[in-house]
Image (cartoon, rainbow, N blue to C red):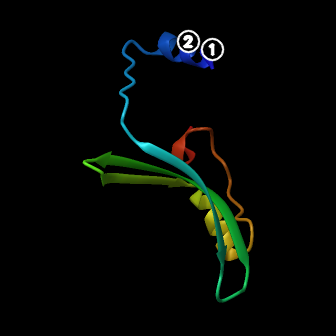
Amino acid sequence: MLEALAAVHREFDEVKFIPVKMAALIVFIGLKQRATGRHLRMHAAHFLEFRNNRIVEYRAFLDTFDAVQQVLGRELDVERRGSGAAGTP
């Protein structure tokens, strides 16, 4: 971890980490697809920001590619073209 942080600081002149007051949850999601009876299993991360005891912001992260493959019941054949986002080199 320290090596990774050091690499970030070597690469960039300005690095900001701004703390956000949030509650974080990692949840297991289990679903049963009505049409096929197939069971789907995945994990998601949920982040909730509170102000005055009310949720003012909600964010969630899920491996949607895995979810789509599970819903379809098969692996998708995808050609990878580099290590960047959305297949960019």
Which residue is at the front of the view, 45 or 80? 45
Q: Secondary structure at mark 1?
A: helix
Local crowd at mark 1 within 10 Å, few (<14), some, or many (≥20)?
few
Residue under pointer 2: 6
**Relative to the observer, which residue lies in front, 70 or 29?**
29
Placement of the C terminus among the 4 image quadrants: top right
Q: Amino acid at mark 1?
A: Glu
* Residues marked 2 and 1 touching at CB (< 8 Å): yes
Q: Which residue in the protein does label 1 denote?
A: 3
Q: Amino acid at mark 2?
A: Ala
Is 21 positioned to the left or the right of 8 in the image?
A: left
- Of residues 67 and 79, the one nearer the viewer is 67
Q: Residue at x 61, y 15 (%)?
A: 2
Question: Residue 19: where, in percent of width, then height?
Answer: 37, 29
Residue 73 locus on image (x, y percent): 73, 74
Place of residue 67 in the rendered image (x, y in percent of width and height, measured from the top left): 63, 65
Q: Residue at x 55, y 17 (%)?
A: 5
Q: Picture coordinates of residue 49 (x, y %)? A: 35, 46
When asked about the image quadrant of residue 34, the answer is bottom right
Taking the spot 32% from the left edge, 52% from the top edge, the residue there is: 57
| Disc marking residue 55 | none
Measure how far apart labels 2 and 1 are at the Cα level.
Answer: 5 Å
**Location of residue 88 by image quarter:** top right
Residue occupying the point 53% across, 49% down:
25
The image shows residue 4, relative to residue 30, as above or below, that is: above
Would you identify the image quadrant in which residue 62 lies?
Answer: bottom right
User: 63 above or below 8?
Assistant: below
Left or right of 79? Residue 26 is: left
Kind of element beneath mark 2: helix
Q: Residue at the far left: name it.
A: 52
